[in-house]
Amino acid sequence: MNARPPALVGISHGTSSEEGRRAVRGLRDGVAEAVARRQADAPPTVRLGHVDVEQPDVPATLASLEPDESAVVVPLLLSAGYHVHVDLAEATAAATDRHVVLAGALGPDDRLATALLRRLVEAGLRDDDMVVLAVAGSSDPRAVDDCRDMARRLAAASGREVTVGFLSAAEPALPDAVTAARALGAERGDRPTPVRVVLANYLLAPGYFDDLARSAGADVVARPLLVADEPAPGELVDIVLDRYAAASADRA
């Protein structure tokens, strides 16, 4: 009989948006379906919890597992800031009744750039548009660096310049980044149509920050990576499984 693999415990930020909640549950469902296909003989338990706003929180999610079941906590967060380095690190360390390993955050990753570019194309991206990557922001410089890294990856994937705007805690603020991108496009002066600023929406799901992004003054705002009632992008499912596998290997 195969030994039971550690549970895959995805921990999202949490949101009060019902649309956002459905979107994140869609990622959980996509991950559960993928592990059932790939490890049909002994698939791991898949759970979803939250670090803020929603329940179950991390301790309650871990407590829902079998008493002897180990776990890998995969942050369903796009960069590794305070929630990963402090909140989740402390929560996993406090779980003394079972063996728990903390995996890496979802980003930065080239596959996220692929998903972001697809959302831009869905939104009607034109060759002469100015692109700004809209990110939540963090007081942790490591998370800010991760977001700037993602802008570089999206620029490479799209073959165009991409700047960054933050919705909280870091500079430039997203409305200022939109204004600067529009001014830069106008300065270049060789565009047949008025300059459009398009936001690449580097947010996991609809919710408070998505609403802020849509009020930041851009002409077009792409949809976030996860959308309610649609299958989770394969890139995100694969990243979650890769983070789980890497942490499981480290645990072994």
Image: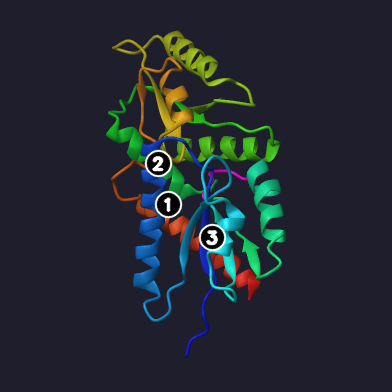
Considering only vertical position in the picture, is 242 above or below 127? below
Considering only vertical position in the picture, is 195 above or below 247? above
Whichever of callouts 1 and 3 sits on the residue coming sooner in the sequence is: 1
How far apart marks 1 and 3 lie (CA) works out to 11 Å
Q: Which residue is mark 1?
A: 236
Residue under the point 41% across and 43% down: 21
Residue under the point 46% across and 71% down: 44
Numbered range of the magenta stretch: 76-81
Measured from the top left, where is residue 111 in percent x and y?
A: 44, 49
Q: Which residue is mark 3?
A: 243
Write down the quadrant of residue 173 in the picture. top right
Report helix, strand or loop for mark 2: loop
Measured from the top left, where is residue 32 in percent x and y?
A: 39, 63
12 drawn magenta: no
Whichever of callouts 3 and 2 sits on the residue coming sooner in the sequence is: 2
Task: Say whether marks 1 and 2 touch (CB < 8 Å).
Answer: yes
Write down the quadrant of residue 147 in the picture. top right
Whichever of callouts 1 and 2 sits on the residue coming sooner in the sequence is: 2
Q: Which residue is mark 2?
A: 225
Report helix, strand or loop for mark 1: helix
- Who is closer to the viewer here, 7 or 135? 7
